[in-house]
Image (cartoon, helix red, strand yellow):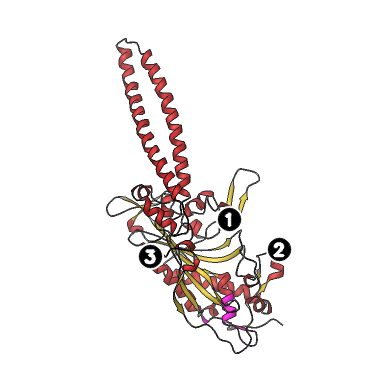
């Protein structure tokens, strides 16, 4: 959530930054300011009436003791009480409307983030060379089927479109990837979290997914109660809620977490031929990194997360590029995002395997997550996240970039210890 103080003091800056996302919300900002002025004026008049009510309440016992007639004062009190009740109702309605409008404002992009949509994304650098083959390379769907790694037909049978089943070497390679990611992050001092997959509404609200994107998740209704939860779309959604409504100490920051979870997405995206297989799905595995930091430590934490995600792809030996996203391609809650995109030879394009993002204080303000600084004052924490990594894009990149002329796939060296020393995955006879 954007700070109301900033909206009051510099509405033109807020409007200009939102326009960088290719969104025009000038009228919404103006309405927020109008409601804010009414709220502050009504708050002042209501507090004055309450002060008058308190003064009258205090003098009634003295009047009774002196034998004075309190009936006029009681009548006055009753009328005043009705006015206060009506004013409180009006104030509540204004506050609710103002909050609703403010929740509809996306995070402000950082100053160095380019305006525009994905066409304005800028590659920062590349790692390695695009693989060249002296044979006709196969796509990851055919490779995974020939190698007995993925069962697409039975995945669709039991889970519908956008579902698959890992089998044999595919299941082992998936598990190897997850173990590799987790072990690397643990070595870097991150705490491992295994969170619940069914979350309450507040989690989506704090993360910035609700109320605007509430229809993009899978909802679960308890048939025997009013309890309603949703399946997490990413572990970030739960990790940024760990300290909701809590006050941290500056000495405790940064806090660094990783979590392995499946991720559940209603929108599996395009069903174009080049997007078949594991490139898009309703459920996929991911290891997520999240940090809570001070405002001063926010930029360094972002660089750290980007570096750690890049290092994983580098150690796997995959060719990729790092791209800085334009404002319109950053998600709703994020002020800055870098994508790590691996090369998928059969598609001739790069596909994102990690998004490293800085939400600044946007999520913490929604979740009332603060820390007490060295100045003894309370400050909103900064939250950051990065995938480390999403396997449903990594595995296609591995099998395509490391395929051999005989249809086999070479296992990346860093994964072999998790696969019993296996160096090559051979086609299933």
Question: Residue tagged by mark 1?
Answer: 216
Q: How packed is label 3: few (under 14 Cα within 10 Å), some, or many (20 or more)?
A: few
- Real-space Cα distance between discs 2 and 3? 46 Å
Instruction: Measuring from the top left, give residue 156's x and y in whole percent.
Output: 70, 66
Question: Residue tagged by mark 2?
Answer: 158
Q: How many marks?
A: 3
Between label 3 and label 1, give the one nearer the viewer: 3
Q: Nearer the viewer, residue 260 or 214?
A: 214
Residue 376 appears anywhere in the view: yes
Between label 2 and label 3, give the one nearer the viewer: 3
Instruction: Measuring from the top left, give residue 72's x and y in whole percent.
Output: 37, 14
Instruction: Measuring from the top left, give residue 276's x and y in whole percent.
Output: 64, 70
Q: Nearer the viewer, residue 285 or 281?
A: 281
Residue 331 to residue 407: above or below: above
Query: Tag 2, which secondary structure?
Result: helix
Q: Quadrant of the C terminus?
A: bottom right
Q: Residue furthest left?
A: 375
Answer with the quarter of the image where residue 296 lies: bottom left
Q: Nearer the viewer, residue 10 or 71?
A: 10
Answer with the quarter of the image where residue 186 lies: bottom left
Image: magenta residue range: 396-413
Q: Nearer the viewer, residue 193 or 389?
A: 389
Residue occupying image coordinates x 42% and y 48%: 29
Question: Residue tagged by mark 3?
Answer: 112
Residue 187 appears anywhere in the view: no
């Amino acid at each position: 959530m954007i700070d109301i103080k900033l909206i009051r003091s510099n509405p033109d800056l807020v409007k200009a930054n939102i326009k960088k996302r290719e969104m025009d919300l000038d009228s919404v900002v103006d309405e927020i300011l109008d409601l804010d002025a009414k709220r502050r004026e009504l708050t002042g008049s209501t507090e004055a009436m309450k002060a008058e009510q308190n003064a009258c309440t205090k003098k009634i016992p003295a009047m009774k003791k002196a034998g004075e007639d309190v009936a006029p004062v009681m009548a006055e009190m009753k009328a005043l009480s009705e006015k206060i009740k009506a004013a409180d109702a009006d104030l509540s309605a204004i506050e609710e409307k103002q909050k609703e409008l403010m929740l509809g404002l996306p995070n402000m992009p950082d100053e160095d983030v380019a305006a525009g949509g994905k066409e304005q994304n800028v590659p920062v650098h590349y790692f390695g060379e695009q693989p060249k083959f002296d044979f006709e390379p196969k796509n990851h769907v055919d490779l995974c089927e020939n190698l007995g790694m993925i069962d697409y037909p039975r995945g669709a049978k039991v889970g519908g479109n956008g579902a698959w089943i890992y089998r044999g070497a595919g299941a082992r390679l998936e598990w190897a990837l997850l173990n590799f990611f987790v072990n690397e992050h643990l070595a870097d001092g991150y705490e491992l979290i295994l969170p619940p997959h069914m979350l309450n509404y507040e989690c989506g609200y704090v993360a910035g997914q609700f109320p605007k994107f509430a229809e993009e998740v899978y909802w679960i209704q308890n048939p025997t109660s009013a309890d309603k939860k949703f399946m997490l779309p990413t572990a970030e959604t739960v990790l940024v809620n760990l300290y909701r409504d809590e006050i941290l100490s500056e000495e405790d920051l940064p806090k660094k977490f990783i979590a392995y979870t499946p991720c559940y997405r209603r929108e599996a995206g395009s069903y174009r031929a080049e997007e078949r297989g594991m490139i898009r799905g309703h459920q996929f595995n991911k290891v997520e990194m999240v940090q809570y930091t001070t405002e001063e430590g926010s930029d360094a934490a972002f660089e750290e997360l980007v570096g750690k995600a890049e290092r994983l792809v580098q150690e796997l030996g995959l060719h990729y590029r790092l791209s800085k996203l334009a404002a319109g391609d950053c998600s709703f809650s994020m002020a800055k995002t870098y994508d790590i995109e691996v090369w998928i030879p059969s598609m001739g394009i790069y596909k994102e395997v990690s998004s490293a993002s800085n939400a600044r204080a946007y999520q913490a303000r929604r979740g009332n997550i603060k820390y007490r600084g060295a100045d003894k004052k309370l400050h909103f924490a900064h939250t950051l996240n990065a995938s480390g990594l999403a396997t449903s894009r990594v595995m296609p990149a591995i099998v395509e970039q490391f395929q051999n002329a005989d249809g086999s796939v070479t296992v990346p060296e860093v994964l072999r210890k998790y696969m019993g020393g296996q160096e090559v995955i051979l086609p299933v006879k």
